Image (tube, rainbow, N blue to C red):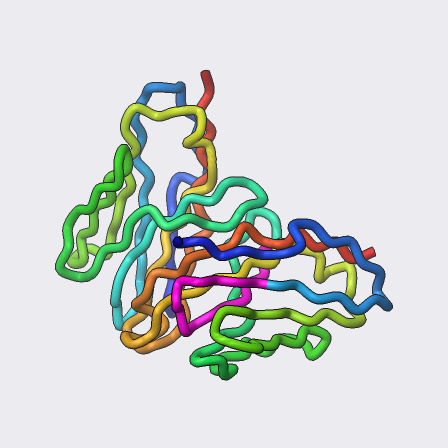
Amino acid sequence: KNQVEQSPQSLIILEGKNCTLQCNYTVSPFSNLRWYKQDTGRGPVSLTIMTFSENTKSNGRYTATLDADTKQSSLHITASQLSDSASYICVVGAGNNRKLIWGLGTSLAVNP
Amino acid sequence: DTEVTQTPKHLVMGMTNKKSLKCEQHMGHRAMYWYKQKAKKPPELMFVYSYEKLSINESVPSRFSPECPNSSLLNLHLHALQPEDSALYLCASSQLGQGLGKNIQYFGAGTRLSVL
């Protein structure tokens, strides 16, 4: 069964600190892995997208890694800001032309 | 321009009302999507249009009726909804060509729907 699991479910950090969010997946055939940021009541915004051959991709203070062998990905946020408070969702695209498989997200709160 | 515009931002309707949600993009994307999202849950795919034709319907009740008048516009017509249909409705668009699972989807800000 295609599945995407994220941890932790929620996280609270202080402004300026770094954090890492985890994503494990069992999706076959695998095509790509995306990280989205979603503010409450808003649509998701794409942060990164990685294919099978990519190990890491950065977007400003966001760095995503992918280990296709262990089927794990992480999203590292550096020097967190209050505006980073949001839900971060790991989404895996299947290579069989079907819909995306969404994780439940990690809810991040950055406190001053 | 990487914007997907949805209107209205908020909508309150009774169970006997008929209303429509609208979505517009000018990125030249030929795939457009409707998602439904409940609080603290990931978006659930409802419909996919490819080249203005309905290609995926995820067993959505007939009280939701999608329409794609042209390559830039996507509507969702609502009729006789139930209170449990209250949710954030998201529109997205993407390029085609490599399969729906392979292209970045750009999302609108959503319409917050409340059914009384």
**Residue A6: percent from left, percent from top:** 38, 47
Q: Residue at x 17, y 47 (%)?
A: A56
Residue B92 in the figure: left or right of residue A76: right
Residue A91 shown in magenta: no
Q: Residue at x 63, y 56 (%)?
A: B7
Q: Residue at x 20, y 51 (%)?
A: A66
Question: Height in image: A28 above or below A78?
Answer: below
The image quarter in which residue A58 lies: top left
Residue B29 shown in magenta: yes
In the image shown, does A106 or B49 lie closer to the viewer?
A: B49
Residue A80 in the figure: left or right of residue A41: left
In the image shown, does A91 or A58 lie closer to the viewer?
A: A58
In the image shown, does B24 or B60 lie closer to the viewer?
A: B24
**Residue A61: percent from left, percent from top:** 27, 33
Q: Quadrant of the C terminus of chain B?
A: bottom right
Q: Residue at x 52, y 82 (%)?
A: B54
Question: Height in image: A3 above or below B114?
Answer: below
Tell me which segment is drawn in magenta: B23-37
The image quarter in which residue A11 lies: top left
**Residue A80: percent from left, percent from top:** 35, 25
**Residue B58: percent from left, percent from top:** 54, 76
